[in-house]
Amino acid sequence: MKDLIRFVRSQDAARILEIYAPYITDTVISFEYEVPTPEEFAARVEAISSRYPYLVYEREGKVLGYAYASAYNERVAYDYTVDLSVYVDAAFCGQNIGECLYAALLDILEKLGYYNVYACITAINQNSLNFHKRMGFEDAGTHKLAGFKHGRWLDVCWYSKRLKADTEAPQPLKPVSAFSNNDLLQPHETYKK
């Protein structure tokens, strides 16, 4: 099997939405209620990937998972901090795809000049909480009863990771367009069992 991690392309949006839709309709992992239309989702992917790294994990030409960074907050002081998201096709969970995607995403974010990454996780999603701990994230606090989905109130946990140890004033961020697929770590280099 030939596995690779690469930057998203516009034609990936339909497959990514196919992976994401069950997380909306069948779980409380995503707090969205309605599956976006293909056009809405394609526009979302385009908007995010124009500013932040948006990666897909591909095996033999099929996208099995994806991960991306997005704005933590729109205020300028937060420019060096991002939120992360990762989703894997349910049929391929447990194959270290999420770990490989996150390792590559964290690597490219550090190269771009980011300092902090956050993940917002539904508190009952123990698999994701454990995953983030394995990836070096720390518990940054819980927001009680933050969301309501599928007939119940849900807590969310925030997890954080510092990418750079220094506390000096940061250098300007590099644009995501300055990097190519050749700059990405590939699965065999990113995560070892």
Image (spheres, rainbow, N blue to C red):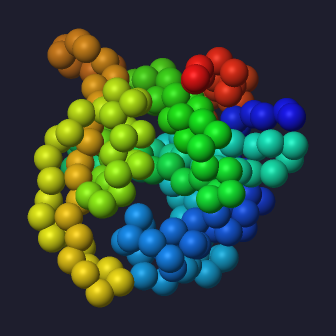
Q: Residue furthest bottom?
A: 151
Quadrant that contains the C terminus: top right
The image quarter containing residue 149 is bottom left
Q: Is 81 left, or right, of 26 in this rendering?
A: left
Q: Position of residue 7 (x, y in %)?
A: 67, 41
Residue that appears at 50% across and 49% down: 86
Quadrant that contains the N terminus: top right
Residue that appears at 14% across and 47% down: 141
- Relative to the observer, which residue lies in front, 154 or 77? 154
The image quarter containing residue 173 is top left
The answer to whether 41 is drawn above or below residue 103 in the figure is below
Q: Position of residue 177 (x, y in %)?
A: 60, 36
Q: Position of residue 107 (x, y in %)?
A: 50, 24
Residue that appears at 28% across and 26% down: 162
Q: Position of residue 78 (x, y in %)?
A: 24, 41
Residue that appears at 25% across and 81% down: 152
Residue 42: in sight, yes or no? no
Residue 142: in sight, yes or no? yes
- Relative to the observer, which residue lies in front, 69 or 153? 153
The image quarter containing residue 117 is top left
Q: Is 187 left, or right, of 150 in this rendering?
A: right
- Relative to the observer, which residue lies in front, 74 or 161? 161
